[in-house]
Image (tube, helix red, strand yellow):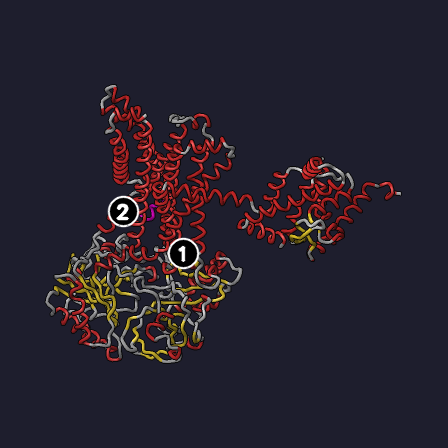
Amino acid sequence: MGDKADVWQGTLALMVLKTLEALGPLHGYGIARRIEQTSGDVLAVNYGTLYPALLKLEQEGYISAEWGTSDNNRKAKYYKLTRAGRKQLEKEARDWEQTTEILARFLAPGKESA
Amino acid sequence: MRALRVLFIRLAELFRKGPREHDLTAEMESHLQMHIEDNLRAGMNRVEARREALIKFGGIEQTKEIYRERRGLPLLESLLQDLRFAFRILLKNHGFTAVAVMIMALGIGANTAMFSVVNAVLLRPLPYREPGRLTIVWGKDDRGNPGNVGYATYVDWRTQSKSFEELALYRSWSPVLQTNEPEQLSGLRVTNNFFRTLGVHPQFGRDFHQEEDIPSASHVVILSHNLWQRRFNSDPSAIGKAITLNATAYLVVGVLPADFQSLFFMDPHGGPVDIWGVLGYDASLPWACRTCQHLVAIGRLRQGVPFTGANAEMDTISSALWKAYPKEYSASGVILTPLREHLVGPVSTTLYTLLGAVSFVLLIACANLANLLLARATRREREMAVRSALGGARVRIVRQLLVENCLLAALGAAAGLLLAYWTPQLLRVLGAGELPRLGEVRVDSHVLLFTIGVALLTGILSGLAPALRLSKSNLNDALKEGSRGTSMGSGQRVRGLLVVSEIALSLTLLVGAGLLLRSLSQVLGVSPGFDSNHVLTMRISVLGQRYSDNEVLRRFFANALASIRAFPGVQSAAVTSQVPLGGNVDRYGFHVEGKIHANPELDESAERFCVSPGYLDAMRIRLLRGRDISERDTATTQQAILINETAARSMWPGEDPIGKRVKLGGLDQPWWTVAGVVADIHHSGLDVAPTMQFYVPHAQWPFPDSDMTFTIRTSGPPSSLSSAAQQAIHLLDPTQPLSRVMPLDDYVGLSVQGRRFSSILLAGFAAIALLLSALGIYGVTAFSVAQRTREIGIRMALGAEEKEVFSLLLRQSVVLVAFGIALGVATSAALTRFLASMLFDVRPTDPATFVSVVVLLVGVAALACWIPARRAMRVDPLAALRYE
């Protein structure tokens, strides 16, 4: 599970940003569920690991947090994408696409030489 | 940028831990509740729903811990914890803390103070533009020594050399300001490019112009900020106005900035230079000749020109000049002395030696503190053991102890900085007169950094050994209630080593101080050749139109002497052109009839004293042969001269010099006939062998000096006569300023001031070192005695002789002291040769000094062992046994 966890840590921030962009302000539990649903069983990791990542993003100023009320009238802390976060998301997404593209070409050398 | 933001946010978290912790718990709680509700909706029962949510979340406490670490700065937090704890511990043991802080304050304070002096004098750049390119340019004499330069030579240098951006000249000048109250000023005559060479611009007004630097137009001056403030009330309109100097009108063209420091002066006792006049020479003047070497050249090298390159070029120019004027130079070649070396070079050895010495004091302080800490460590073994047993990591425990020590050192540093703050006042009291740039000594950022560095180093150095020892002590033994004998072997060994090194270091310092003090007493024991007791001196510069007549000038001095001699309490009085040890140099070529070199520049030179009759009497200089000069030697009689023993011996070996003839300062001068031989006097310093000297009667010297000093021998204390003597001169002519009214003794004192300064400082350091090592020896003995109280009790109870127990107790200390002394003697023998240049008439390995220092140290050490041992002996054997 070590390898999987590394990928998880590295991409978690990007997933959080993307989730917040897609769904708007959301609490930690919602973000965790959304990421789990999107990735299926592939990334079955503890929800708890999300919170230090959220804190880091908040300290970096990419997201902001505020206490609010959930649909079920429960108090929850809502995270929201900031302007800097939006930019960061664009940049990271671009970087990520570039990386995967290069890797894809690498992993399928047959096509290239043909 | 982002990283910085994160750092600040995390730093800020230190101050709002409570609410944030609450926040975190609430967030996790809400997360779990939402998850449980979802699970319930999905059809699980309560228990199942809760279980599943918890499993999915992972370890709650672990998550919180990771979160916390991410939130703040854990390293800093635990450091703060350590610091808080250290404060509490130190407060609790305030006795120990006070002693430790005092030790540190002594060590760090002495170092900071010394460093602030070194920093100001040696390290801070000279206050001129790009000072690294400034250099003094000397002519070389036939002995290879640097010498002043004549104006004609300077002109050739300047026009032929390409290495210099600017080449300027300066010479001494002591004008008298005659606007309002007359005052003798300390000044310099400089070429018009002098300030441009230094890279200094006047704050008000302007610099000198080139067209002012000629004989006919040279009456312009620039004032120091201080003089402008003091005598002209900082009045801006003073610039452009005329002032009277030496009965001549001078135009003030500029005022220098307040922070300008004149580090150039030619009269060491003249005080800071306050006024600069333009030199105003041209080659036609008689005193502009090549042999008229009374000027100092200072140059600014062109960008990128190295000193060696400039030196080589100047040597070439000089050797061409030597060939062209073989009779006007005694040798070819120039010497470039970088300005820094010229100004502070002479004192740098002394200062670095003292800095080295004071670092020994710091080492001793460290060793002492380490010793104290080790002793305390044994008492804290249980505390550390408990902490270890409860899971405290070794690193954490060591860090805790180091933090404690650094805190101690910081407290010591604060106390030390206080000391350094008072350094300038201290220096004034010590009289460090000869050190240049002392006005700049203060606590600046460099000094502060140095102190912080020293404090940290001290804290770590002194704390490391005890900390390591403590952290690896045996848990089991230490935890046992009442356990007393955890093996102290290694601890005692370390403490012993520390004491040995303390003793060795103090001994080295004591030997150094002893050598310097012995040198000082040797120097003070040198007979100057005159009797400085009960002599009042008083300098006067007689100026004005009416004194341009030699006879009027001579009569003025004769009248002044007559009225001074009339005072009760005056035994004799005379005037002289310079006071012995007064710091002036006035040398004339000494051309002996029949022994003149083909190149007269190669003839010896001698110090000139232009005196009135009665001078030998007033100064008690012994007449060895022939006769003294008297009132009968007048302008119309044969020109008579007195020479000193050295001159007689070196110029007329095996001959009677009386009646022989000599020309002074050039072959175009008249012959003087030797009338008498007098004893040598020390003029350049008590530690400098006297050179050739001669005395000419003021009545016969063709250009009688107007700047003279009265020497008045009194029967009572000289100062009692000072106001009466000044009054007498004032009655004759109130416009003539008197200066330096002081006992002749003070000149002798001033001449050894530098030597006294370094001796006192080193002796002070050695005293601190001795005190600290005495404390160290005392501590070790007291500690080992305390450890053995029970043993002593048993031995005494079993009937051991008091003497035997006593020697048993002292055996260890005696061994330590013996080792320390042996090591110290070896170290001293190796190190004292670095003091050689500061010694006088004492060898660096002077046995008397070594022996007396060893005796002193043994005495102090014996006392430091004896007191605690004695106390232990008074313990009642029964009480000692019961105590256990």
Q: Residues within 10 Å of mark 1 (few under 14, many from 20)?
A: many
For residue B125, what is the image quadrant?
A: bottom left
Task: Report helix, strand or loop for mark 1.
Answer: loop
In the rendered structure, which amino acid carries the disc numbered 2?
Answer: Leu
- Picture coordinates of residue B219 (x, y %)? 37, 77
Q: CA distance from mark 1 to mark 2?
A: 29 Å
Res B458 seen here: no
| Rendering quarter of residue B239 | bottom left
The percent coordinates of residue A45 (x first, y second) are: 71, 39
SS at circle 2: helix
Residue A47: image x %, image y %?
69, 41
The residue lying furthest to the right in this view is A114
Question: Residue at point 28% right, 40% down?
Answer: B846
Residue B630: image x %, image y %?
15, 67
Q: Numbered disc 1: what chain?
A: B
Q: Residue lying at the far left in this picture: please name it.
A: B568
The kind of residue on which mark 1 rests is Val
Q: Where B423 sits versus A43, above or below?
A: below
Range of residues picked out in magenta: B834-841
Closest to the observer, B194 or A100: A100
Badge 2 density bin: few <14, some 14–19, many ≥20, Cα 10 Å: many
B523 relative to B400, above or below: below
Q: Of the numbered discs in the image, which one, if any, rests on residue B443? A: 1
Q: Nearer the viewer, residue B148 or B100?
A: B100
